[in-house]
Image: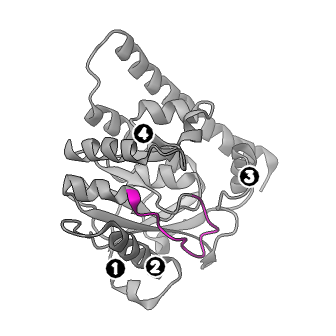
């Protein structure tokens, strides 16, 4: 791929980020003027932005399963920062993010304006975050978290931390497990994972130095949380996602859902 074409693709992503900054600025002005900016509106605008960002990334996406009709606590394996855009385009929702993300230039501000909740792991504030999550879910707003607490190379799933799943129990909503897989020529993609000391710009340039990869998003069977133990919920969600990520045959029953625009079956690759 030519350098000119690669930088052109990066410029397209930066243009989308500029759009996001404009949207976030509008929310900032509304806050200053004390105008009502509901979470519903923030989530819809966030979904709009995530769709544009996903379209600018070098991925061809196929979605399997049904999107839930009611608010749920979404839990997913975590491979890259691109997970957020690809999952955030599916439905209006907010994210639970590491506190460090809040300090990222541009991205942290955008995340905060979109209604993200931030947690500093190991800082002893899990009870406060749990209460915030519970309030968020009780107000009928979907929330997505990555229970592994870090990214992986996409070939396996780490242990899910279950303490914050108590928010789903407290708010009486179900868990929506999600498995995301990055593939290149039918094998796990070694380029998409964002791990170790990788930096955002280098990762973006690396992505655009190659042709499109395929992404599978599996919306798995929701898990009822009422009268359940959080450790059991974490294990059930972890195992359901692990079976898909590792290619265990149990996941073959999922049916692909036709998607508009870029969300199209892999077989229709251009």
Residue under circle 2?
Answer: 244
Number of the label disc, if any, that sits on residue 173: none
Q: Residue furthest front?
A: 124
| Residue underneath mark 1 | 254
* Marks 3,4: beta carbons within 8 A: no
Percent from the top left, x then y, of residue 3?
81, 48
User: What residue do we see at 26% from left, 36% from top?
Assistant: 40
Quadrant of residue 264 in the image? bottom left
Q: Which residue is mark 4?
A: 116
> CB atoms at circles 3 and 1 under 8 Å apart?
no
Up the image or down, 28 lies above or below 1; here it is: above
Q: Are marks 2 and 1 in contact (CB under 8 Å)?
A: yes
Element type at mark 1: loop
* CA separation in Å, label 2 and label 4: 27 Å
How does the figure colour the protein chain or chains?
Answer: one colour
Q: Nearer the viewer, residue 193 or 266?
A: 193
Rounded to the nearest angstrom, the CA distance separating label 3 from label 2 is: 26 Å
Q: How many marks?
A: 4
Distance between the Cα atoms at labels 2 and 1?
Answer: 10 Å
For marks 3 and 1, the one nearer the N-term is 3
Q: Which residues are magenta?
A: 150-163
Is residue 144 located in the magenta-colored stretch of the structure? no
Q: Is residue 126 left or right of residue 229?
A: right
Reading the image, the residue beneath label 3 is: 198
- Image quadrant holding the N terminus, namely bottom right
């Amino acid at each position: 791929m030519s350098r000119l074409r690669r930088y052109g693709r990066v410029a397209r992503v930066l243009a989308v980020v500029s759009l996001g900054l404009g949207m976030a600025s509008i929310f900032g002005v509304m806050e200053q003027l004390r105008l009502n900016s509901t979470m519903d509106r923030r989530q819809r605008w966030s979904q709009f932005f995530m769709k544009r960002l996903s379209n600018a990334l070098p991925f061809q996406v196929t979605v399997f399963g049904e999107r839930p009709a009611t608010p749920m606590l979404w839990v997913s394996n975590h491979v890259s920062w691109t997970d957020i855009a690809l999952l955030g385009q599916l439905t209006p929702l907010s994210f639970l993010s590491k506190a460090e993300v809040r300090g990222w230039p541009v991205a942290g501000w955008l995340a905060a304006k979109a209604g993200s909740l931030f947690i500093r792991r190991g800082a002893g504030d899990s009870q406060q975050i749990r209460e915030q999550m519970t309030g968020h879910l009780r107000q009928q707003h979907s929330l997505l978290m990555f229970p592994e607490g870090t990214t992986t190379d996409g070939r396996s799933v780490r242990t899910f931390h279950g303490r914050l799943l108590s928010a789903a129990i407290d708010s009486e909503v179900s868990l929506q497990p999600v498995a995301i897989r990055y593939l290149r020529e039918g094998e796990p993609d070694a380029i998409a994972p964002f791990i170790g000391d990788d930096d955002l710009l280098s990762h973006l340039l690396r992505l655009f130095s190659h042709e499109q990869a395929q992404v599978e998003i599996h919306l798995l069977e929701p898990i009822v949380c009422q009268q359940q133990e959080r450790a059991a919920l974490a294990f059930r969600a972890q195992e359901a996602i692990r079976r898909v990520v590792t290619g265990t045959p149990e996941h073959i029953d999922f049916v692909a859902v036709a998607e508009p625009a870029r969300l199209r079956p892999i077989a229709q690759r251009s």
